[in-house]
Image (cartoon, helix red, strand yellow):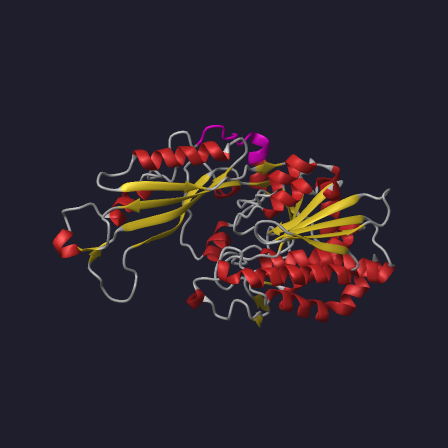
């Protein structure tokens, strides 16, 4: 292991340069205009795996390809399956970026680029950790298989088809995912829970075309007003979701879990500063840490409709809409939650408008016992890389394919957090510290040992 770490120290500058090259590929999966770029990122990762010493291929399907890699040293050794994603969130709003999102730049010691923390940096680090072992020792101390998808940020299906069709090829003793944040700057984490997800789009239609608000105002229903009324019905004044049936099956937070979340010692002032918010808000009777990972939510992600350009255009819009995502906790059924929200929206539709609701398939929440042999191995690796024991955390986000890994391969993931929280993932000016990148590589080196 010492030789592998020395190899890293010798090649840090080159590895950082490679990360910048990877980040410069605008692999946005949600927008068709970036499709060729996303495929270029897949080819880049395949080539990088091969250069590191892996057999690699692209699994093609109806969408963006999934990258597969494998290096089997000895069938008697344990086998780790590494998961990551090469696609990134859309960069908009572009005007809020201080640098160009796909021209990675160092600003005050931070890498600024879309996808640097989520998830290109941690994904590349896992591969480079393997290369350090291979270059320094001629082989790995463990068998490694790699699956890196290109549609994590857009809900594509190729990776699910891949896990199903290549189940035998992906069989492993443990699954490692580095797509979660650490607990604080310089403090890594082991995340033992993720929330599930179901998405909806609400479309409200009124007149057959945009109408002059002088002639028609007050005479026909306004879809934008109707949309606002509908959105307002989703929560009560205390932040609790007001959809009947939404909380069916929600697993209660028991005393052990409450104590574990309390031990995280969330600094609310620091949390608010990182969010640029002035005060916390949410469901009464729960702490911020509990609401963040152990309670379900229903959030409006964007609203559209009518005239949004410069100046005034006096119209009643023909339609308006919004996009909604619900984060789910253990024992909630994504299909039933989606049906409940759809039913609620249709039942509360004001007169004079037509309501359409489109739902995604969704994914269930994930929760595991953090006190397992593999979790202890991951904790030891993080301790070695950071010089600090990892904190146990429960994530508020979602990694939908986790359910497929459990269903098809029987694997719960080791979710290891190697980058500082507050990295502005999904927001303008996403950032990533070079030290976190190198610590992630050191974590991989120690974990394989």
Viewer can see residue 385: no
- Locate residue 183 relative to residue 296 in the image: left or right: right
From the viewer's perspective, is 49 left or right of 352? Answer: right
Spot occupied by residue 159 in the image (x, y as percentages of width and height) = 62, 47
Residue 169: quarter of image: top right
Residue at 60% over, 60% down: 39
Q: Residue at x 31, y 33 (%)?
A: 347
Measured from the top left, where is residue 359 in percent x and y? 44, 41
Q: Position of residue 32 (x, y in %)?
A: 49, 58
Image quadrant containing the N terminus: bottom right
Marks counted in the figure total 0
User: For residue 315, which quarter of the picture?
Assistant: bottom left
Q: Nearer the viewer, residue 42 or 413?
A: 42
Residue 97, placed above or below residue 330: below
* Residue ID at (62%, 59%): 120
- Name the side, left or right, on which 53 lies relative to 61: right
Q: At x 19% / y 59%, what residue is drawn?
A: 314
Q: Is residue 3 left or right of residue 46?
A: right
Q: Is residue 116 visible?
A: yes
Our reading of the magenta stretch's main secondary structure is loop
Which residue is nearer to you in this view: 399 or 37? 37
**In this view, which residue lies farthest toward the left?**
215
Vertical placement of 273 versus 76: above or below? below
When the figure is inspected, residue 241 is found, relative to residue 28, above or below; the finding is above
Residue range in magenta is 247-258
Determine if the magenta segment contains residue 19. no
Q: Position of residue 75 (x, y in %)?
A: 85, 43
Which one is in front, 18 or 388?
Answer: 18
């Amino acid at each position: 292991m010492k030789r592998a770490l020395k190899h890293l120290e010798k090649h840090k500058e080159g590895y950082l340069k490679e990360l910048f090259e990877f980040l410069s590929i605008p692999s946005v999966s949600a927008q068709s205009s970036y499709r060729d770029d996303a495929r270029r990122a897949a080819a880049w990762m395949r080539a990088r795996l091969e250069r590191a010493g892996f057999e690699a291929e692209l699994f093609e399907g109806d969408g963006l390809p999934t990258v597969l890699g494998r290096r089997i040293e000895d069938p008697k050794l344990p086998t780790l399956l590494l998961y990551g994603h090469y696609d990134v969130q859309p960069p908009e709003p572009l005007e809020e970026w201080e640098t160009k999102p796909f021209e990675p730049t160092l600003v005050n010691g931070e890498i600024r680029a879309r996808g640097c923390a989520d998830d290109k940096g941690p994904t590349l680090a896992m591969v480079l950790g393997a290369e350090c072992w291979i270059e320094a020792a001629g082989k790995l101390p463990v068998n490694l298989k790699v699956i890196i998808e290109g549609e994590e940020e857009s809900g594509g299906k190729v990776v699910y088809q891949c896990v199903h069709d290549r189940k035998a090829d992906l069989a492993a003793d443990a699954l490692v995912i580095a797509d979660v944040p650490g607990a604080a700057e310089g403090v890594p984490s082991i995340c033992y829970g993720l929330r599930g997800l179901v998405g909806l789009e609400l479309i409200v239609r009124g007149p057959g075309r945009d109408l002059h608000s002088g002639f028609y105002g007050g005479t026909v229903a306004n879809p934008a007003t109707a949309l606002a009324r509908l959105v307002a019905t989703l929560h009560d004044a205390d932040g609790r979701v007001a959809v009947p049936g939404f909380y069916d099956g929600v697993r209660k937070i028991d005393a052990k879990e409450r104590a574990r979340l309390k031990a995280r010692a969330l600094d609310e002032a620091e949390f608010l500063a990182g969010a640029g918010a002035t005060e916390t808000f949410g469901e009464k009777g729960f702490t911020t840490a509990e609401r963040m990972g152990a309670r379900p939510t229903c959030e409006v992600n964007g609203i559209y409709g009518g005239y949004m350009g410069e100046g005034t255009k006096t119209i009643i819009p023909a339609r308006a809409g919004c996009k909604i995502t619900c984060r789910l906790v253990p024992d909630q059924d994504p299909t039933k939650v989606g049906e409940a929200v759809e039913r609620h929206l249709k039942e509360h539709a004001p007169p004079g408008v037509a309501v359409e609701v489109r739902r995604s398939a969704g994914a269930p929440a994930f929760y595991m016992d953090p006190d397992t042999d593999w979790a202890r191995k991951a904790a030891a690796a993080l301790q070695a890389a950071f010089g600090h024991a990892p904190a146990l955390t429960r994530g508020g986000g979602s990694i939908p394919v986790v359910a497929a890994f459990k269903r098809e391969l029987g694997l719960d993931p080791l979710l290891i957090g190697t980058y500082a929280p507050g990295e502005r993932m999904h927001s303008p000016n996403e950032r990533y510290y070079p030290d976190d990148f190198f610590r992630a590589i050191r974590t991989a080196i120690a974990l394989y040992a």
